[in-house]
Structure formats: structure tokens, C-alpha cells
Image (cartoon, rainbow, N blue to C red):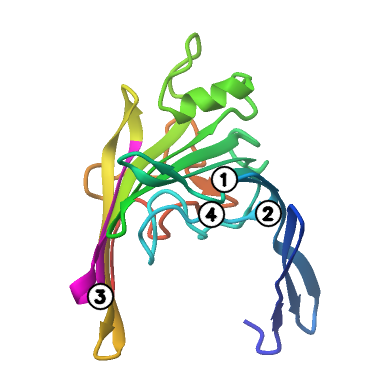
Amino acid sequence: MNKDNLFIHLEGDARYGLISFYVNPFLTLNPESESFKLNKGYVKLYVGKFSIQAGKDSLWWGQGRHGSLILTNNAEPFKLLKISNEVPFNLPILGLFRMDFFLTRLEEDRDHPKPYFGGIRLSFKPNPWLEFGLTRTAITGGKGMPSLRLGDIGTILIGKNLEGKERGESNQIAGVDVRIRISPLKAYIYGEAAGEDEAGGLPYKWAYIAGVYFSDIFGADLRVEYANTAFEYPGWYTHGVYTSGYTYKGRIMGHHMGRDAKDFFV
């Protein structure tokens, strides 16, 4: 790396009525060249309890903090459409409920150029000490694959195969995560478990994350987190049809350790 490189990282946001904006530009300077790009930037429209977001952003879904199995900021931010309920609903038994849905298209330079990539996450908090979530993402479509209707993407995201289309046309990952607060210890225990494929609408070929976090140990905090994608299937983040794998611009969209790996973080 050239020692004369200069990196300038800026961000700003504003809101006017039902519309908000966020920008995060990134400027790089060195003696030979300079570059400027929008790292993140989006506009968000608020409609009742919901928001509709369009622009460039990254997503982190799950309880893991050193990494998460399904979605992290390891890859470059996506140009996406995202719909969420900004204000949680209060459901009987299940408690506070939030839904997040996004849809994007991945890059041109891959085995099946510009496939759709979408996901849905349902988060629940039935008690102040307990929260859990259900997540599913899928890569589907793209050049050389059967054309898709908008409803097909929703069918895939709920774990069903498309009738009349050959099997293997989507690369799916789904899982569950949970976090439990232990108030007397000022601590949380948390975990994730996800399947790299689906059978009968349910995930299998599992990987997992387990962790514990103490917020106050003699004035300091402590996190211990373990992740394993070698637990049941060494081919995590790979696919027989979408051979570019679960990546965006060459970087894994889930846990940075990749496939067939174990990660221990303190």
C-alpha cells in the first residue's frame, strides 16, 4: 500500500416530512490517481408503520456480531429495494413483530449474469428477555435461466419449488436465530442455525453460530463467539447451478470465514 494514500469517509442524513435521505461517499487520493464513489446512499419513504427504501445499502441479519451466516456487510453494499415496518406490530403471544424484505440484482460478471437476489426476515420479541428471528434468502433467475414472474420470487422465498421448472434454479439459505437476556449477569446468550439448501420447504445441511456477551465485567465487556460452516456440509456458500456461489462481486454475502470453516472470536 502506498503510504501517501488518503481516504476520506463522509456521511450525512436528513429527513423532511415522510421522506428521509442518507449518503455515505468515499474518496481515495494518492499521487497517481483519485477515485470517488458512493459507498451507501438511499432515499426512504414512510407510509404509516412501513418504510420503502431505494438505493445502495448493506444488510446484517442475525445475532452474530463477528459474523452472521446469511447476511453481513462483508460484500459491497447492494442497489436494492427494501420494505420494512419501522414501527413494530404487537402480536398475541409472539409480541413485538418486525418484517424486512429486500430485492436486488447481482452483478453482470458471474456464471448467470444479473440474477435476482432477495430475502425476507421476520423478527419477534415475545418478552423483554427473549427475541428470535426467521430468515430466508435466495438467488434465482439470471441470463441463461428460465424467466421469472414477480410472484415466482415470493414462492421461492417461502421455500417452495416452482411448478414446471427444473429443480435447482435457486440457491437458497434459511435459518433461525435467538437471543436471550440474563439480567442478573448483565449478559446475553445467542445463536444462529441455518441450512444451505432446502428439502420439503425446510432447510437442511446446517451450519451454526453460538455466542455469549457480558456487558459489564469489572467495567469491561466480553464477547465469545464460535461459528461453524463445516458442521454438516462442507459446500456452504456454493451451488451446483449458480457456480459463482453466494457472493456479490467476488465476496461472500454471509460470514466472512467462508465455507468448510470454523471461527472462534473473543
Say what amino acid the circle numbered 4 marks. Leu
- Residue closer to the observer: 249 or 20: 20
The residue carrying mark 2 is: 56
* Alpha carbon distance from label 3 to label 1: 30 Å
Vertical side of 29 occupied by 194: above or below: above
Relative side of 160 to 234, left or right: right
The residue carrying mark 1 is: 84
- Quarter holding residue 204: top left
Instruction: Tell me where residue 97 appears, x and y as whole percent.
Output: 43, 45
In primary-sequence order, the first of circles 3 and 1 is 1
Q: Mark 2: few, some, or many residues within 10 Å (few <14, many ≥20)?
A: many
Vertical side of 89 occupied by 43: above or below: below
Is label 3 or label 4 in front? 3
**Residue at horizontal 55%, vertical 57%?**
75
The residue carrying mark 4 is: 59
Q: Which residues are magenta?
A: 180-196
* Alpha carbon distance from label 3 to label 2: 36 Å
Instruction: Tell me where residue 49 appears, x and y as whole percent.
Output: 59, 46
Say what amino acid the circle numbered 1 marks. Ser
In primary-sequence order, the first of circles 1 and 4 is 4
* Alpha carbon distance from label 1 to label 2: 16 Å
Q: Are marks 3 and 2 in contact (CB under 8 Å)?
A: no
**Residue at horizontal 43%, vertical 19%?**
161
Asked if the stretch drawn in magenta spans residue 183, the answer is yes
Q: Secondary structure at mark 3?
A: loop
